[in-house]
Each structure stands twice: as C-alpha cells, then as structure tokens.
Image (cartoon, helix red, strand yellow):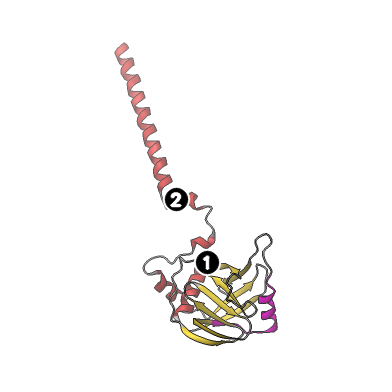
Amino acid sequence: MKNKFVKRMMTMTAATMISIGLLAGCGQEEASDPGNTQADTNVSSDTDTTIQGGDGETQAVQAGADVSELEVHFGDNGDAFMMRLEDNDTARAIAGYVGTSDWRLPIYERDDDADYSVLQYYDIPSRYEIPSKPQTVTKAKAGDVYYSDPNRIVLYYQDAEISEEYTKIGTFDATEEFVTAVAENPELEGWGNKIILISRP
C-alpha cells in the first residue's frame, strides 16, 4: 500500500514537471515569433508600409501604374491640393508606396544653401527604394515637384533659377490658395516642424 502511494505521488510530480516545461516552452515560442501581433501593437502605421514579395521597388512601380494624382495637405488640417503625376517610374513608385499607407512627412528647413522662400523639401524614410533618372534642371516653375536622390521630395512654390540634378515627379496648379497654404503651413506645437500629408485621392 505504501509503495503504491509513493509511485502515485512520483507519477503526479513527474506529470506536473512535464506540464510546466511544456507551458514554459510555448510561452518562449510565442514571445520569439516575429509574427506575434501583440509585439507589433506599438508600431506606427508609417513603419508598416511595405510591398510584400519580390523586388519592393518593382512592385511599388507596378502598384502605382494606374495612379495619375496624389492628394496633398500642408499641415494636419490643411486643405487638399492635387498633384498631377509625371509618367515615369519615380512617380509610379511613390504612388505605389503611398497606396499601402498614407505618408505624413516632416518639413525641414536646415540646409544653409536652400532658398526656403521658393522651395520646401520632405525626406522620405530610407526603407523606401525609389528609382530615379535625374537630369539637370535650370528653371523651376511654381508648382513643380521633383525627386532628389536619396529619398527627398522637393517642391517649388515660387519660380526659381536653379542648377540641380532632379527627376520631375509632379505638378500642382500654383494658385494663390496653393502658394499661401505652402508658405503659411503652421509648425506643430511643441515640435518645431511643419507636416505634409500625402495620400491617394
């Protein structure tokens, strides 16, 4: 009787130890799983933007092939202005990436050589691969939008004489409302930067 009791206690102890080991292993597997959605809950929508499978640049170009315009807001609450896109792979890639997630980009005024009374520029995160075929540009008209390698969008909201290597990606109608919206885009309170929002219409 005593031996049966000891054997039963040993069997229960062994079963308990195996169960604890299995549960601990499952917890570690879940924590290390890169697809675990709980681990991604604090990731902003901006970092979720990817083109799945194959060459991301090629897929972005294909995804933007049928897009002729993008909607742009200067400031979080600014009016919408339409940018007509050029027929090239640079514009198509940007439209393709914007199609997966709207872009909310900061506006910087840090370059000593830039004339901010005629232009603004917006840096695109480096994870986006954007093709370009730059050409020398000597005159920019108000409303012209260019891509500057690496990963920068340059908008001219006033006419300018320049000498830059750019790929043109689009054009705005340079109405008085447009120029005012660009020039008077307010800085975000407590941040010191302005914001531009780019999305598909």
- In screen coordinates, is 38 left or right of 109? left
Mark on residue 86? Answer: none
From the viewer's side, name the closer residue of 38 and 106.
Answer: 106
Question: Does the stretch in magenta take in 178?
Answer: yes
Q: Residue furthest top?
A: 1
Up-down relation of residue 87 to residue 185 (above or below): below
In the rendered image, which quarter contains the C terminus?
A: bottom right
User: For the residue marked with disc 1, what is the amino acid?
Assistant: Ser
Q: CA distance from mark 2 to mark 1?
A: 21 Å
From the viewer's side, name the closer residue of 120 and 36.
Answer: 120
Question: Does the image show residue 25?
Answer: yes
Question: Does the stretch in magenta take in 82?
Answer: no
Give SS at disc 2: loop
The residue beneath circle 1 is: 101
Give the residue at x 39% y 32%.
20
User: For the residue marked with disc 2, what is the amino acid?
Assistant: Asn
Residue numbers of the magenta segment? 170-185
Give the residue at x 54% y 75%.
153
The reply to whether the C-beta atoms of the residues labelled 2 and 1 are less than 8 Å apart is no
